[in-house]
Image (cartoon, rainbow, N blue to C red):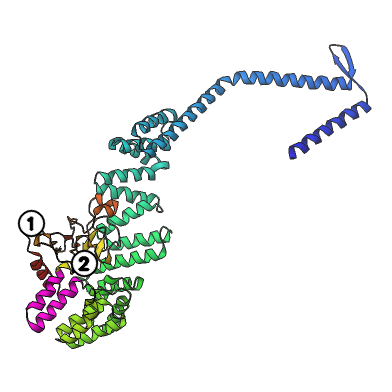
């Protein structure tokens, strides 16, 4: 619209000028070489205009002639760039579709047409990766890592390649360098955190989590939970040798996550040693109310070392009232009543758990009650036999691995706060008690819980409780060590193992 208005304004000005010249006629005299030339003003103006047009045309022709080589060169570069971008685009599509031959061909064309630009180097590296040429991929990533513009991207590629060849030292170095250059890069921070956890450097891991939270890379609540887990891990590793420092770390963890069972258990034990029974009881009660757990019940019943069996029974009943008579609290009452030889009270507490299908722990506890009251007779062995086919009790489970002991990270994937207290899958369990097996050979073998000594760098268990394919896909990488102990895998018995009844009896006695 503005252009039309400007054009109309210029046209009006030209018309006005033409009318003015027509209304004011005159002559123009030009003296050249002693001769005088006169002409009308309109003719003189027309001549000047034509001369200007001719001069402009001549200048354009001369300029075009002189600039023709440069124009041809620019046109050639533009055509090469267009072809290179087309090859780059097709190469990326080939990489995404998993076509290594096309990817390599287009990567070569893009590099020839565009040179070593960031995208061409990335395409070259990815084409080498899907082709299985690890050396070419690493060379491309090293070239990228040497350029300031693509340094972090190159470090990312080198990190992935180091992980694939199981070179953890190099992978950690690449991740640390990337985190230093770009503190907000998520993958580098996660890799650094995983390495710190694997080394048991819990203080550095806490600092990493705090830095990630301050940069907005993770949710505040998730950061609080991870800090609590890391502080609990530190307290667990120092509980035996440095109880005071461990107690402070456990109390910080409880403040961040009051429902974290291991933190509350460690804090309760250490505070009880310092004779701070009320504070310990308050922490354990809050955690048990949120997450009833046998470790918390054990700590709560043993807060006072001088308590009698009846005192522990009264404490177990208080815990049951606090948790609205949760099954874990009933089991704690049953155990305390057995120690106090209150057999009737023990049966009364366990009665609601016997209505459906009692678990292995409940059956074992009932066997102990029968044995303590009536001797090792038929009733005791009957409960041990029921334990053979009873549902399994909850365990700490992470990435398909079951453990009797909590650990801060998964032994399979190295993931922080991976263990969850839940019932293992029943795919290896026996049939229901009312479905008697047809033949002894059809009776399923019992599960054996293997207890290992705590090791600085435990190896991954050989047989997980569930399909490893359902676990974290990172399970193919080396096992990250867990400071402070090794998880307990659940495995099937080897050939020549005891019979189901004998194994169940031994397991039940061990649990009880």
The residue stretch that appears in magenta: 358-387
Choose top left, top right, bottom left or bottom right for residue 15: top right
Q: Residue at x 19, y 86 (%)?
A: 345
Q: Which mark is residue 405?
A: 2
Q: CA distance from mark 2 to mark 1?
A: 27 Å
Q: Looking at the magenta stretch, what is its main secondary structure?
A: helix
Residue occupying the point 38% across, 64% down:
222
Horizontally, residue 142 falls left or right of residue 299, namely right
Of residues 322 and 381, which is closer to you in this image? 381
Report whether 341 appears left or right of 158: left
Q: Which residue is mark 1?
A: 495
Residue 21 part of the magenta segment:
no
Q: Is residue 359 magenta?
A: yes
Q: Is residue 151 above or below residue 343?
A: above
Q: Residue 387 at x, y = what percent?
A: 15, 70
- Kindly tell me whether residue 304 is visible in this rendering: no
Where is the C terminus found, in terms of image quarters?
A: bottom left
Tag 1, which secondary structure?
Answer: loop
Residue 200 pos. (x, y %): 25, 60
Where residue 402 appears, as percent x and y from the top left, is 22, 62
Total label count? 2
The x and y percentages for residue 169 are: 25, 49
**For the residue carrying disc 2, how many other residues have a C-alpha within 10 Å: few (<14), some (14-19), or many (20+)?**
some
Q: Determine which quarter of the picture holds residue 114.
A: top left
Q: Secondary structure at mark 2?
A: loop
Is the Cβ of the residue at disc 2 closer than 8 Å to that at disc 1?
no
Foreground residue, 215 or 422?
422
Image position of 369 with respect to 447: above or below: below
């Amino acid at each position: 619209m503005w252009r039309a208005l400007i054009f109309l304004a210029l046209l009006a000005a030209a018309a006005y000028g033409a009318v003015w010249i027509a209304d004011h006629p005159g002559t123009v005299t030009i003296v050249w070489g002693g001769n005088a030339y006169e002409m009308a003003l309109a003719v003189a103006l027309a001549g000047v205009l034509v001369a200007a047009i001719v001069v402009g045309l001549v200048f354009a022709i001369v300029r075009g002639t002189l600039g023709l080589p440069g124009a041809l060169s620019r046109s050639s570069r533009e055509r090469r760039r267009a072809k290179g971008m087309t090859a780059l685009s097709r190469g990326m599509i080939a990489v995404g579709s998993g076509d290594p031959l096309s990817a390599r061909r287009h990567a070569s064309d893009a590099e020839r047409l565009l040179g070593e630009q960031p995208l061409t180097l990335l395409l070259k590296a990815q084409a080498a990766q899907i082709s299985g040429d690890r050396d070419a991929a690493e060379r491309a990533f090293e070239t990228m890592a040497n350029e300031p513009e693509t340094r972090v991207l190159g470090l990312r590629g080198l990190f992935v390649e180091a992980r694939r060849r199981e070179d953890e030292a190099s992978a950690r170095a690449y991740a640390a360098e990337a985190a230093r250059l770009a503190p907000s890069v998520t993958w580098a921070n996660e890799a650094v955190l995983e390495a710190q956890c694997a080394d048991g450097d819990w203080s550095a891991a806490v600092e990493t989590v705090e830095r990630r939270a301050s940069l907005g890379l993770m949710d505040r609540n998730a950061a609080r939970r991870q800090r609590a887990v890391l502080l609990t891990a530190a307290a667990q590793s120092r509980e035996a040798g440095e109880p005071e420092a461990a107690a402070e770390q456990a109390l910080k963890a409880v403040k961040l996550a009051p429902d974290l069972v291991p933190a509350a258990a460690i804090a309760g034990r250490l505070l009880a040693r310092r004779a701070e029974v009320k504070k310990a009881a308050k922490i354990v009660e809050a955690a048990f109310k949120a997450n009833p757990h046998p470790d918390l019940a054990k700590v709560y019943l043993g807060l006072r070392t001088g308590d009698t069996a009846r005192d522990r029974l009264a404490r177990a009943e208080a815990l049951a009232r606090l948790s609205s008579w949760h099954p874990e609290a009933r089991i704690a009452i049953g155990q305390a009543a057995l120690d106090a030889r209150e057999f009737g009270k023990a049966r009364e507490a366990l009665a609601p758990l016997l209505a459906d299908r009692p678990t292995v722990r409940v059956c074992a506890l009932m066997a102990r009650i029968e044995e303590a009251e009536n001797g090792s007779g038929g009733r005791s062995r009957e409960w041990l036999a029921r334990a053979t086919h009873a549902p399994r009790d909850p365990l700490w489970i992470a990435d398909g691995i079951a453990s009797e002991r909590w650990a801060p990270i998964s032994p399979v994937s190295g993931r922080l706060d991976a263990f969850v207290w839940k019932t293992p899958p029943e795919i290896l369990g026996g049939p229901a008690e009312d479905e008697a097996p047809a033949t002894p050979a059809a009776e399923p073998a019992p599960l054996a819980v293997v207890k290992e000594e705590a090791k600085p760098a435990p190896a991954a268990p050989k047989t997980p409780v569930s399909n490893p394919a359902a676990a974290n896909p990172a399970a193919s990488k080396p096992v990250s060590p867990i400071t402070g102990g090794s998880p307990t895998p659940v495995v099937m018995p080897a050939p020549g193992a005891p019979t189901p009844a004998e194994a169940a009896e031994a397991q039940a006695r061990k649990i009880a």
